[in-house]
Image (cartoon, helix red, strand yellow):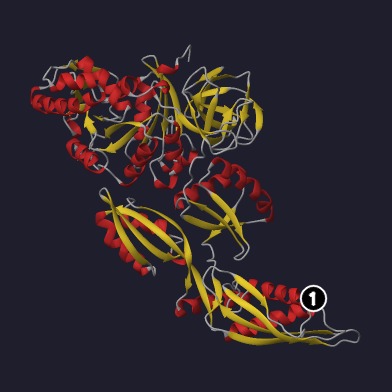
């Protein structure tokens, strides 16, 4: 990488809806920059960035992949990200650390569901953005339609920098609307092109596009604005210089048509990266927190500033081991120095810095502000950790994680698998922060949760292949609860006489319903000492232990108050154990008399879909006992807000994909508990009783 300068570094992420051509564009860029001598293809499973066995098996990107290369004396750190919603974090985390983004738009499909999501990341992180209208050589490619779609649904600041020459099978090049130069390609995948002038049939379109783009560009330069308004002709060089300012300031989002596989227009995209995208030095300071406080400070992108970086990805390489991917936001570091994990308070030795090209890496001795590199064997480092040098304790804000939307209960197939499961899950969670694992004592399930069925399928496959753990899976049990609807009283008397000292306990309980979510309260209303004070805690303990397994179906009993108001005792035979047993008896009798019901968790669900799918989605949610709360527009998409029982949503990710042809996404969160309808409650109770009978 030679004597690099921060001003010559470009960092960017490729983002889009799935199937828009990001990986093919990465491959063409690597070919055009001379890194590879032959372009791979996703279908042939030989691309640089899709190297994971699961990616090759499924012909989709699953992980964000870093490729660092040099083009026209610029060091380009390119992160190719997945396009499917199951891998949301692998899109968002790279967008947090780059300075720019290329949003790929399929020329025949326009703005899709996930396109909107990745555009939101660009807005959130204020990244300079270029729109790549991809697959211009394919059937039904519609450049004008795609541009209109972007402008109407994402941003009216998106304007063509190039216009296509031809479309579909006749797509052969493009014209720069500022310079009027045309670039005609062979279309055989080679780098070769012929430079010329604007084709006559495009002259009017180019002139109109130049005028529209110029009007927007001059907003970035007051002097040019004045001259333009006075009617002065501006040169292409002046406009190009101002365009860089406009792109960095997010006043303009250039649009470039291209086709990666025939290698048409890719070099023009790379030129735009070098010419218009910001260097680290063009970026405003990043926000960090001072020490252990929440006080914000600025981290300036300066090479002479203290070293600060953020880990945004951890990958386990079968040969190298653990790789921690970091973005350097300030300063510089050499490989003979120690690195300090501010988040963990741990200092570690650096084995090397690696500039990655997919799974391959080349070692470097020094990294500087703007670099994105992998560091092997940092045992303490996880995603979102701030890495610095000892003595620096400022830290970057954490990277937001999405809530999982799909869960499976997992069961080891053998005792050997059970012994290995904990270590396997721990390692897989370190690598993928969007996975969650928890054990639920009330249902007995060990639950693995993620962003969709494909996400969990891949995680389980990795657990099996890497760590040799065989697992069975089932739909998780619902965390039902039991409660009551009316007040009831009951006596529990436990009396047992043996040859020696007997057992005696006697309590009277009154159960009263409470509001949902308020738990259990216990009140001592005993008067006259009929139950001695020293036995009251035992009675409460007996109640709470009995409530852990309710009366209807063995689910925890909740949301009631219990008052002990009467009872009796024996001077010799009474004991804490006897009063615990008596309390359990009184609770069960009173609970049965208090009109017990089963209640279930209700989820808030937010479903984002195209307008033409809203009716199907609402009908499906109604069929799941859902309540539609409203519909909010978001561009050309609609967000259906609803509440639905958790029991009806365990496989909703699969159903939604089918209903919307993969165009829908959703998120959900716990809301509250509600009574289960009697017919469904009976089925739940009968199923529990059947399992109990079989076990006996």
Q: Where is residue 413 in the image (x, y as percent from the top left)?
A: 62, 56
Left or right of 282 in this view: 218: left
Snapshot quadrant of residue 446: bottom right
Q: Residue at x 66, y 29 (%)?
A: 347
Left or right of 149 in this view: 422: right
Q: Position of residue 421 (x, y in %)?
A: 64, 50
Disc 1: which residue: 534
Query: Crowding near pointer 1: few (<14 within 10 Å), some, many (20+)?
Result: few
Locate the C terminus by quadrant.
bottom right
Using the image as rendered, state which of residue 364 and residue 362 is in the foreground.
Answer: 364
Q: Position of residue 359 (x, y in %)?
A: 50, 29
Snapshot quadrant of residue 68: top left
In this rendering, the count of numbered labels is 1
The image shows residue 39, relative to residue 70, as above or below, that is: below
Using the image as rendered, state which of residue 305 and residue 135 is in the foreground.
Answer: 305
Q: What element carries label 1?
A: helix
The image shows residue 584, relative to residue 121, as above or below, that is: below
Using the image as rendered, state which of residue 182 and residue 339 is in the foreground.
Answer: 339
Looking at the image, can residue 319 be seen? no
């Amino acid at each position: 990488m030679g004597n690099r300068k921060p001003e010559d570094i470009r960092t960017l992420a490729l983002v889009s809806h799935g199937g828009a051509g990001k990986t093919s564009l990465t491959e063409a860029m690597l070919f055009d920059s001379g890194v590879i001598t032959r372009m791979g293809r996703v279908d042939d499973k030989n691309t640089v960035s899709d190297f994971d066995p699961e990616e090759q098996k499924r012909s989709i990107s699953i992980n964000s992949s870093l490729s660092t290369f040099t083009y026209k004396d610029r060091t380009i750190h390119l992160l190719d990200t997945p396009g499917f919603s199951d891998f949301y974090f692998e899109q968002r985390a790279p967008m947090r650390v780059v300075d720019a983004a290329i949003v790929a738009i399929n020329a025949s499909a326009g703005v899709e569901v996930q396109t909107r999501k990745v555009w939101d990341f660009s807005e959130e992180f204020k990244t300079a953005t270029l729109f790549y209208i991809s697959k211009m050589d394919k059937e039904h490619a519609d450049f004008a339609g795609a541009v209109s779609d972007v402008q109407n649904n994402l941003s009216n600041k998106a304007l063509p920098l190039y216009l296509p020459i031809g479309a579909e099978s006749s797509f052969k090049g493009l014209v720069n609307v500022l310079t009027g130069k045309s670039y005609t390609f062979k279309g055989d995948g080679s780098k070769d092109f012929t430079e010329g002038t604007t084709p006559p049939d495009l002259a009017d379109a180019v002139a109109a596009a130049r005028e529209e783009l110029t009007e927007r560009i001059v907003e970035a330069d007051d002097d040019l604005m004045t001259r333009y308004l006075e009617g002065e002709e501006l040169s292409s060089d002046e406009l190009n210089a101002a365009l860089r300012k406009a792109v960095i300031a997010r006043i303009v989002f250039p649009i470039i048509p291209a086709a990666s596989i025939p290698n048409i227009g890719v070099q023009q995209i790379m030129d735009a990266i070098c010419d218009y995208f910001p260097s680290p030095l063009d970026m405003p300071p990043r926000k960090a927190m001072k020490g252990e406080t929440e006080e914000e400070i600025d981290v300036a992108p300066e090479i002479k500033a203290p070293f600060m970086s953020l880990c945004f990805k951890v990958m386990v390489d079968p040969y190298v081991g653990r790789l921690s991917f970091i973005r350097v936001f300030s300063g510089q570091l050499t490989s003979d120095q120690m690195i300090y994990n501010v988040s963990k308070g741990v200092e570690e030795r650096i084995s090397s810095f690696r500039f990655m090209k997919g799974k391959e890496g080349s070692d470097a001795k020094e990294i500087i502000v703007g670099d994105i590199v992998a560091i092997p064997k940092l045992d303490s480092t996880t995603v979102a950790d701030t890495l610095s040098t000892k003595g620096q304790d400022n830290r970057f804000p954490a990277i937001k994680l999405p809530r999982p939307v799909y869960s499976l209960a997992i069961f080891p197939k053998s005792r050997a698998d059970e012994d290995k499961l904990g270590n396997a899950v721990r390692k897989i969670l370190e690598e993928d922060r969007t996975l969650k694992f928890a054990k639920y004592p009330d249902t007995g399930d060990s639950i693995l949760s993620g962003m969709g069925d494909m996400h969990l399928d891949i995680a389980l496959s990795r657990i099996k292949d890497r760590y040799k753990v065989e697992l069975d899976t089932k739909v998780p049990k619902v965390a039902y609860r039991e409660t009551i609807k009316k007040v009831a009283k009951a006596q529990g008397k436990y009396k047992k006489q043996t040859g020696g000292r007997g057992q005696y306990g006697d309590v009277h309980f009154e159960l009263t319903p409470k509001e949902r979510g308020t738990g259990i309260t216990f009140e001592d209303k005993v008067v006259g000492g009929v139950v001695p004070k020293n036995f009251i805690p035992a009675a409460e303990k007996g109640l709470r232990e009995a409530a852990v397994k309710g009366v209807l179906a063995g689910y925890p009993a909740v949301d009631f108050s219990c008052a002990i108001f009467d009872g009796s005792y024996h001077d010799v035979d009474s004991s804490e154990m006897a009063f615990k047993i008596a309390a359990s008896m009184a609770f069960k009798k009173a609970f049965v008399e208090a009109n017990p019901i089963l209640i279930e968790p209700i989820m808030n669900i937010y479903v984002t879909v195209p307008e033409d799918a809203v009716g199907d989605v609402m009908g499906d949610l109604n069929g799941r006992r859902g309540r539609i709360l409203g519909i909010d527009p978001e561009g050309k998409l609609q967000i259906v807000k609803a509440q639905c029982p958790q029991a009806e949503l365990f496989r909703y990710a699969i159903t939604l994909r089918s209903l919307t042809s993969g165009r829908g996404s959703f998120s959900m969160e716990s809301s509250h508990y509600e009574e289960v309808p009697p017919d469904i409650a009976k089925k739940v109770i009968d199923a529990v009783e059947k399992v109990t009978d079989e076990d006996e």
